[in-house]
Amino acid sequence: MVASEIRALFAVAARPEVVSLAGGMPYISALPLDAVGEMAGQLIADRGAVALQYGSGQGDPGLREGICEVMSLEGIRAHPDEVVVTVGSQQALDLITRIFVDPGDVVLAEGPSYVGALGTFASYEADVVHVPMDDDGLIPDALAAVLARLGRRPKFLYTCPSFHNPAGVSLSGPRRAEILGICQRAGLPVVEDNPYGLLGFDGEPGRALRADDPQVIYLGTFSKTIAPGLRVGWAVAPAGVRDKLVLAAESAVLCHSSFAQLLVREYLASQPWREQVKVFRELYRERRDAMLDSLQASLPAGCRWTTPGGGFYVWLGLPPGLDAKAMLPRAIAARVAYVPGTGFYADGAGLDHLRLSYCYPEPDRIREGVRRLAGVIDAELELRATFGPTR
Ligand SMILES: Cc1ncc(COP(=O)(O)O)c(C=O)c1O
């Protein structure tokens, strides 16, 4: 296990003079914190003996009912018995990998992929093989080609089909059926990681992969729609995997925080959570627009970036010859932070890309951050013109 690029960055990026476009922290101040505080106090006063007691490895049944209601917004029809509560979706990723992967096993993952998933796969010594994406998400032909070329059967495909971290793109409708078809024919389990599915900026949420294939192992979380500090996520999986998930969860943590689970359950039952998700969507949309407008206004020719329809991230490609990792200290000196693309690949790729997040800073700070970043890229281009490529 090695420290991720993001981890090393957090300390520097947290300085107030730095505009951090690096971390993916939700904007918690937009939650009705007073109401949540009142609920928490009331919960302890009324049901403290349960809320502060051990619970079950599968999670609170009432919360699991609420989770099924949340998932129905993306077309998933699941029974509460099919849901396993986890410590955020990060723990679900860990448990799934623990169940499926022995050292040296192959895991397929989009290139680029969420850094936290890659860290988990590495800690179980998986051999990650990336499958390329484009603006419509994972490329079906590329997946088929990787499967044909590998000669070994991968343990699963890890994918984040909606508002991808870090690429900011979504798997198009027609490709969803194609990818599911390829995986079904190859007997390849699909792990769908979906923290951002409800945070689309245009219209109602789309359908999750799991909505069209009950064999899909689905990971959800309240980290982006309520708060990551609660550490409440979940997995939905076919029966055999689900039983193992409960055993693995029990061996990892005995049970999840009863207090956090009951708080989320109460929040779903008594607060206007659908309206609150809309509040988040509007807020993040405004920030996405601020970022896209200022990228358009200030970045030099040769840069290209994705246009996210939801979620938290823009994936930015640098002009040829520039190295996002080498540029980072100069960006920090210019008081702007991002995550170099290499963090999102298991194989050293991604030097010419970086991830920008727009979820946390106010729009004015985003504009200022992009202005600073543009200055840094301009200076790199001048260096390259004088001394040749930096890589
Ligand atoms: C794609 C993806 N998966 C999983 C997680 C982990 O989320 P949590 O453990 O807070 O549910 C994140 C967090 O940023 C993420 O972006």
Image (cartoon, rainbow, N blue to C red):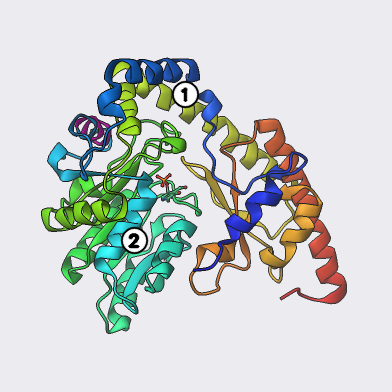
Amino acid type, residue under disc 1 in the picture: Val
How would you classify the magenta stretch by its main secondary structure? helix
Q: Relative to the observer, which residue lies in front, 173 or 358?
A: 358
Residue linked to disc 2: 158
Write down the region rendered in magenta. Answer: 65-71
Amino acid type, residue under disc 2 in the picture: Tyr
Residue at disc 1, secondary structure: helix
In the rendered structure, the answer to whether residue 206 lies left or right of residue 8 reads left
Residue linked to disc 1: 279
The quarter of the displayed image where residue 151 is located: bottom left
Residue at disc 2, secondary structure: strand
Q: Residue at x 76, y 60 (%)?
A: 329
Q: Which residue is drawn at 20% across and 55% down?
A: 247
Q: Relative to the observer, which residue lies in front, 71 or 97?
A: 97
In the rendered structure, the answer to whether residue 291 lies left or right of residue 172 reads right
**Residues at marks 1 and 2, CA–CA distance in whole angstroms:** 30 Å
